[in-house]
């Protein structure tokens, strides 16, 4: 028979893993929401959406699409989120030189950020549903 303290320890560890899973899933969903709201012409703006755990990605006034080229997303933000520690702040932002006027016009970041409480709530409900075990 498992001791009470071992059961409590197991419960705490499982809870911490669930909280971390909700945190990472919520960050992924916000990043996806920003991308979905971002206009795509060449794909450069969307491809310039970066993540970091050390500082906010800064707009580079020289970051512009090359003439005639198209761009695709990479997994940079997903990798940052997946590799983040529970105590890390996850920063997300655009690097493209024209990101600020696009945000002003389209609101892709601010409108996605407004969804944060609902996104976290949904991810938490899904995590809770996955963790329910039938009692026998």
Image: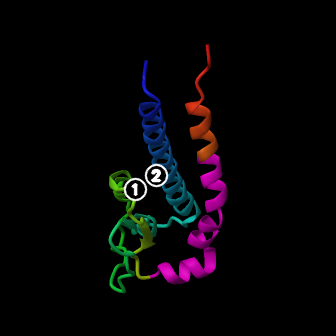
Q: Secondary structure at mark 2?
A: helix
> Where on the picture, by quarter, is residue 104?
bottom right
- Magenta-span inclusion, residue 106: yes
Judge whether residue 122 is colored magenta: yes
Residue 108, percent from left and from top: 58, 69
- Mark 1 near mark 2, Cβ–Cβ under 8 Å? no
Quadrant containing the N terminus is: top left
- Left or right: residue 125 versus residue 38 is right
Q: Nearer the viewer, residue 117 or 44?
A: 117
Residue 128 % position (x, y)? 60, 38
Q: Point out the residue furthest to the bottom here.
A: 61
Which residue corresponds to the image point at 60% horizontal and 72% vertical from the top-left?
A: 110
28 horizontally vs 121: left or right:
left
**Magenta part, dominant SS:** helix
Is 62 rendered above or below residue 34?
below
Q: Which of the two discs, 1 and 2, labels the residue nearer the N terminus? A: 2
Please tell me the numbered disc located at residue 86: 1
On the picture, is 134 further left or further right than 58?
right
Q: Which residues are magenta?
A: 98-123
Q: Residues within 10 Å of mark 2 (few under 14, many from 20)?
A: many
The image shows residue 10 at horizontal and vertical percentages of 43, 34
Which element type, helix, strand or loop, lies under badge 1?
A: loop
Q: Please give the name of the residue rendered at 45% of the width and 49% of the height, measured from the top-left corner.
A: 20
Q: Which residue is mark 2?
A: 24
Above or below residue 69? Residue 72 is above
Residue 5 left/right relative to 103: left
> CA–CA distance between discs 1 and 2?
9 Å
Q: Residue at x 43, y 27 (%)?
A: 3
Q: Nearer the viewer, mark 1 or mark 2?
A: 1
């Amino acid at each position: 028979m498992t001791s009470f303290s071992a059961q409590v320890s197991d419960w705490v560890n499982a809870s911490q893993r669930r909280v971390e899973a909700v945190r990472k899933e919520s960050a992924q969903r916000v990043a996806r929401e920003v991308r979905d709201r971002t206009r795509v012409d060449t794909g450069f703006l969307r491809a310039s959406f970066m993540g970091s755990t050390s500082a906010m990605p800064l707009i580079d006034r020289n970051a512009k699409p090359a003439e005639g080229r198209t761009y695709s997303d990479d997994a940079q933000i997903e990798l940052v989120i997946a590799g983040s520690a529970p105590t890390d702040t996850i920063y997300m932002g655009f690097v493209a030189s024209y990101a600020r006027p696009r945000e002003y016009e389209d609101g892709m970041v601010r409108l996605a950020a407004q969804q944060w409480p609902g996104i976290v709530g949904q991810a938490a409900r899904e995590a809770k549903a996955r963790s329910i075990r039938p009692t026998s």
